[in-house]
Structure formats: structure tokens, C-alpha cells
């Protein structure tokens, strides 16, 4: 009897181990099959495929749906995508079409094999986490999978349950049909295409098409795919390096880039473009073709065409030396001038915060000025972050907390101890003026005092609606500014105005909604003892948003600043602040 029990125990344990091993093999084989399918999408020819993503809690909702109709007798296909209730279609055949029923958008171009988009799909596969055998075994031990047989809508599947969820893998092709993990559900269905006409052209009756180069559509789709891929990889950390280009240089240390530029406008543009050529190209692709693709679908006008019109519309308001510098960046990076111009004129809509404290608010009366930039971390701008020390001939030197290829300034300080940061508002379409980022750069390059900077910004035609904090380390004070094309209102320290109703002595505080209330609370709690460390706590989450792209803390009197950039999944305020001094940024010649 005892022997029988022992045998049954061994058999049961063996069955459990076998089931565990089989479940692991099924899951990881399915994972590898998905990667192969992304690299070889032609495997789906002659198929009708549907992928759906659902969020199950706190309230069940469909986040995205993708449906593919692919002909077996040709490369023609129709791809319908609905993301967050924004549907659009891509049709590839005798011509290439992109349509969006909601905005009645219709773009058409010549036939295109979508080479760049296919390459981007393969990059998605390459970006999937590559787990060694040992890591896969450890994951199996942690998630404790087991397998049963199950029918999913009449299709025989291996149904693997694991800690926190389950995955159903089709016995026929080894691809997942359902993946449930915590509050997420992904479903995948495929079957032979019954009606080849489904893949022949756009559905519905879209309005007459705007003609677009097919290669531009391909670049846009590939840029959108690459932006999605970013969520699978960390921000690349470059090795320490030092390179020169003419009078300019690029220093990379501990993952931080410092770009030093010196010379005439075109010269510093060439230095910028050559030293950061791959970064400039990536940023332009993400802005022009990634963000721009969303703009094209929403507005019904191809973004590059709209950007070219905006460049000409704003040309009378932009100093010629800035166009010369942009031309230099394009020449140095080997990119079309129109591309770099569009990336620099792209309207900025940031949702940010700014704070300047001094006098009784700080330890020793030191002026501290913090700028919080909250903007689109999901598109990977932080990958191309760079601190620029710019010494343009005939202008004041200034430090610019910016991004490769972008010559304007949204966060900066000049050698005369004047610092400026910006916060976006509304006013889209009011673009007959100097773009905000070039207006701020002009103030930094041309002004010696707080009053001069305010006057410079007041006297020039402006765009949209923006708010600013401007500080001066010489006078140890600051001002807030609310500006539209029609109005220019200055807020003095401690003043209460309708949008900023709280009075705080020796402080200028700009934010919005609950973030403004939290900012006021934190400054009041630390009033009288604020230093750089306390300022970092003041601008932490609650004031900074989850899309916190970069933070900068200026101490203008000492010409010092502390900078933090976002990582892939952590806001800038949660990253390490790196200190820069003026002598370090502009070493003696």
C-alpha cells in the first residue's frame, strides 16, 4: 500500500512538472512566434486578422482595435485602426490611401511597398525583451503556469493559466488568441479572407483625396511604430566621449550631453547638426512624421504642407540669423531644410509650471528659479535631450536646456544672469508673430536685465497664449508674465490675480488647477528655508505631471543650474539632478 502511494505521488509530481514545463514551452514559443510574425508580416497574406485591446477596470472599455484584410494574390491590403475612438484606414494596392472617417480626411499617393514601415515592424520585434533560458525558467517559477485545453470561438487552444492572468494559444499556428493580465485583455483572431474586395480600397465615401508622396506616408507610419517601440526600451545611455567640430564641441559624460557652440549663425548650426546628426534626424522624424501624422489625421491637412505654410507665415517675424542657423543644422545633419524648419516652427503646447523665490522665502535671500516642462514624454524627446552652451557672434552667451536640432529656447539663462521659463496656454492658430521659443531665445541673447527682457517680449509680435517666469540674479527678483498676441500682463511677486489668486511673499508661482494649489502649499510650508534641495521637493510629482520631460533649477546670481531629464518610465522630477556651472559650460578659451 505504501509503495502504491509512493508511486502515485511520484506520478502526480511528474504530471505537475510536465504540465508546468509544457505550459512554459507553449507560452514562450508563442512569444517567439509573435516576434517572427512582426518580422515577416507577409505570413498574413490571404488573411482577415483582428486585434483588440481592452481595459477591464476600473471601467471596462476598448482602447484599440486593429483589423487587417490582406489579399493572397497580391501585396494589396487594407488596415483599419481605431485607437481611443480615433479610427483611420490605410489601404495599399494600386494606390496608397490614408482615410479617417471622423475628420473626413483622405490622403492618396502612388503605390508603395511600405519598406520603412516593414523595417519599423521588425524593430518592434527586436525591441521585445530577449530573455535567456534561465530567465524564462525563473519567470515560470514565479508565475507558476499550468495548461488545459480550451475552445476559443470554435478554435482548439492551449489555455495557460498563471499568477495574475492567462493566455490562450492556438494549437493550429502557435499564436496567442487571448492574453489576460491583471486589468488588460488582448484578443487576436485570424481566418482566411473570404472576400478579396475587402482589401481593394477605402471603405465609405471619403472626400476627394489630397495628394501626398507615398514615401511620406511610409515615413509617417514608420515613425508612429517607432514611437510605440520606445515603450519597450530604455533611454539609450551613450558612452563618455568628446568630439570637436570647428569651434564647437560635444561632451558626453555620465549619460549627459553638453553641446558647446561658438561662431556665426550658420557656423554654429553646422556644428550642431554634425555633432548631433543621428539625434537631430530622430527628433525630426518623431516630430514631423510621428506627432505630425496625428496632426494630419486630426486636421485633414498633411503636416509637412501645413508646416511649410506656417514657416512662410512666420518668416517676417523671425530674425534672419535664426533661419541661417536652421540652415546650418540642416547642412550639418544632412537633412532637407524644410524638415528642420518644420521641426523648429512646430507650435508648442506645453503644460508646465514655473516658480521663482527669493528674499524672505529662501535661505540667505538667494534667488532660485525653477522651471518644470511637462510635455509628451511618450514620443521620446528625452532621448535627444542636450544642454547647449551657445556663444553666437554679436549676442550674449546663454545656456539652453533643449533637444537636438531645436534652436529655440523654452528654458534658459544668459551670462547677464537673466533666466526665463515658459508655460503654455491656448490660442492655437494665432501664429502671426515670433514663435515662442525664438522669442525667448531673442530675449536671452539681447537683454541684460529683467526689465529689458520684459520690454523685448512686450514689443514684439507674439503667438498663441503663453505664461512666463523671468528672473534676474543681479536684482534678485522675478516677474510672472501672461501674454497673448493682444495682451502682455506682468505679475509682480506676492500679487494676487484672478488666475493666480494666492499671495506668497517674495515668490512668483505659475501653474494651473490642483498643481497650482499644491505649488502654493509647498512653497508656504518651506517658506524661509528654501534651498536647491527643497526646490527639488517643491517641484516633485503633484506639481510636475507624469509627462514631466525636464526640470531646471537656476541660481542666476551664481550662474549655476541643476537639470533633470525624464527616463523612459520615470518623470524628470524623479531622476537625478545634474549641476552645471558657467565655467564648466563656457570654459576659458
Image (cartoon, rainbow, N blue to C red):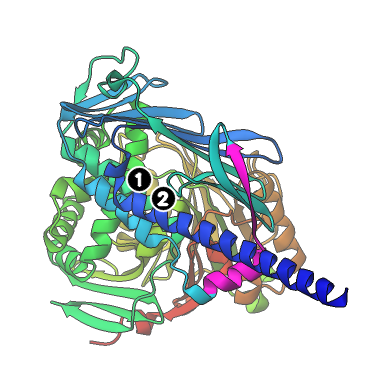
Q: Residue at x 28, y 14 (%)?
A: 207
- Gap between marks 2 and 1, in whole Å? 6 Å
Name the side, left or right, on which 134 lies relative to 543. left
Q: Quadrant of residue 81?
A: top left
User: Residue 146: within the magenta?
Assistant: yes
Residue 129 position, x and y percent, is 45, 64
Per the image, label 2 sits on a secondary structure element best described as helix
Nearest to the observer: residue 77 or residue 481: 77
Residue 187's x, y, as percent?
53, 39
**Mark 1 lies on residue:** 224
Residue drawn at x 71%, y 50% as measured from the top left? 517
**Relative to 576, is 354 above or below?**
above
Residue depicted at x 69% and y 46%: 514
Residue in view at x 36 percent, y 84 percent: 583
Tell me the quarter of the image containing the C terminus.
bottom left
Tell me where residue 398 appears, x and y as whole percent: 33, 68
Magenta span of residues: 135-151
Does 521 sit left or right of 301 as displayed?
right
- Callout 2 touching callout 1 (CB < 8 Å): yes
Image quadrant occupied by the N terminus = bottom right
Q: Residue furthest front?
A: 1
Residue 220 visible: yes
Amino acid at each position: 500500500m505504501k509503495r502504491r502511494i509512493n508511486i502515485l505521488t511520484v506520478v502526480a509530481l511528474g504530471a505537475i512538472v510536465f504540465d508546468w514545463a509544457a505550459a512554459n514551452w507553449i507560452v514562450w514559443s508563442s512569444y517567439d512566434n509573435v516576434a517572427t510574425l512582426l518580422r515577416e508580416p507577409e505570413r498574413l497574406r490571404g488573411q482577415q486578422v483582428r486585434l483588440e485591446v481592452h481595459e477591464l477596470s476600473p471601467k471596462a472599455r476598448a482602447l484599440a482595435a486593429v483589423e487587417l484584410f490582406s489579399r493572397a494574390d497580391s501585396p494589396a491590403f487594407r488596415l483599419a485602426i481605431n485607437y481611443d475612438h480615433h479610427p483611420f484606414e490605410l489601404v495599399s494596392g494600386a494606390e496608397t490611401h490614408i482615410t479617417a472617417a471622423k475628420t473626413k480626411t483622405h490622403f492618396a499617393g502612388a503605390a508603395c511597398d511600405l519598406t520603412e514601415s516593414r523595417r519599423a515592424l521588425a524593430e518592434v520585434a527586436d525591441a521585445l525583451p530577449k530573455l535567456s533560458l534561465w530567465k524564462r525558467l525563473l519567470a515560470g517559477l514565479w508565475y507558476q503556469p499550468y495548461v488545459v485545453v480550451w475552445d476559443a470561438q470554435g478554435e482548439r487552444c492551449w489555455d495557460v493559466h498563471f499568477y495574475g492572468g492567462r493566455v490562450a494559444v492556438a494549437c493550429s499556428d502557435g499564436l496567442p488568441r487571448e492574453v489576460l493580465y491583471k486589468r488588460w485583455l488582448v484578443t487576436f483572431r485570424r481566418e482566411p479572407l473570404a472576400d478579396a474586395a475587402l482589401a481593394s480600397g477605402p471603405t465609405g465615401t471619403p472626400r476627394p483625396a489630397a495628394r501626398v508622396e507615398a514615401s511620406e506616408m511610409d515615413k509617417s507610419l514608420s515613425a508612429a511604430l517607432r514611437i510605440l517601440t520606445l515603450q519597450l526600451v530604455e533611454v539609450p545611455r551613450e558612452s563618455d566621449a568628446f568630439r570637436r567640430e570647428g569651434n564647437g564641441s560635444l561632451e558626453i559624460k555620465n549619460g549627459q550631453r553638453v553641446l558647446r557652440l561658438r561662431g556665426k549663425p550658420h557656423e554654429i548650426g553646422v556644428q550642431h547638426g554634425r555633432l548631433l546628426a543621428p539625434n537631430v534626424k530622430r527628433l525630426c522624424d518623431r516630430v514631423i512624421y510621428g506627432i505630425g501624422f496625428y496632426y494630419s489625421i486630426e486636421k485633414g491637412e498633411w503636416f509637412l504642407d501645413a508646416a511649410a505654410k506656417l514657416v512662410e507665415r512666420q518668416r517676417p517675424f523671425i530674425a534672419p540669423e535664426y533661419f541661417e542657423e536652421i540652415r546650418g543644422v540642416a547642412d550639418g545633419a544632412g537633412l532637407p531644410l524644410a524638415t528642420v524648419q518644420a521641426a523648429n516652427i512646430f507650435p508648442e503646447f506645453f503644460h508646465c509650471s514655473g516658480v521663482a523665490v527669493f528674499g524672505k522665502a529662501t535661505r540667505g535671500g538667494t534667488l532660485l528659479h525653477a522651471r518644470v516642462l511637462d510635455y509628451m514624454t511618450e514620443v521620446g524627446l528625452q532621448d535627444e535631450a542636450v544642454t547647449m552652451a551657445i556663444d553666437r557672434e554679436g549676442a550674449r552667451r546663454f545656456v539652453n536646456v533643449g533637444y537636438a536640432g531645436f534652436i529655440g529656447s523654452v528654458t534658459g539663462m544668459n551670462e547677464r544672469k537673466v533666466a526665463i521659463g515658459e508655460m503654455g496656454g491656448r490660442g492655437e492658430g494665432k501664429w502671426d508673430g515670433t514663435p515662442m521659443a525664438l522669442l525667448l531665445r531673442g530675449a536671452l541673447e539681447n537683454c541684460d536685465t529683467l526689465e529689458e527682457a520684459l520690454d523685448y517680449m512686450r514689443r514684439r509680435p507674439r503667438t498663441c497664449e503663453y505664461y512666463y517666469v523671468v528672473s534676474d540674479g543681479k536684482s534678485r527678483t522675478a516677474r510672472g508674465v501672461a501674454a497673448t498676441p493682444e495682451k502682455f500682463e506682468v505679475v509682480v511677486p506676492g500679487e494676487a490675480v484672478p488666475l493666480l489668486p494666492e499671495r506668497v511673499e517674495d515668490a512668483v508661482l505659475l501653474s494651473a488647477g490642483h498643481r497650482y494649489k499644491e505649488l502654493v502649499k509647498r512653497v508656504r510650508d518651506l517658506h524661509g528655508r528654501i534651498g536647491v534641495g527643497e526646490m527639488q521637493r517643491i517641484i516633485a510629482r503633484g506639481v510636475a505631471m507624469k509627462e514631466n520631460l525636464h526640470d531646471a533649477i537656476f541660481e542666476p546670481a551664481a550662474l549655476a543650474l541643476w537639470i533633470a531629464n525624464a527616463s523612459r518610465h520615470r518623470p524628470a522630477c524623479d531622476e537625478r539632478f545634474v549641476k552645471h556651472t558657467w565655467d564648466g559650460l563656457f570654459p576659458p578659451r
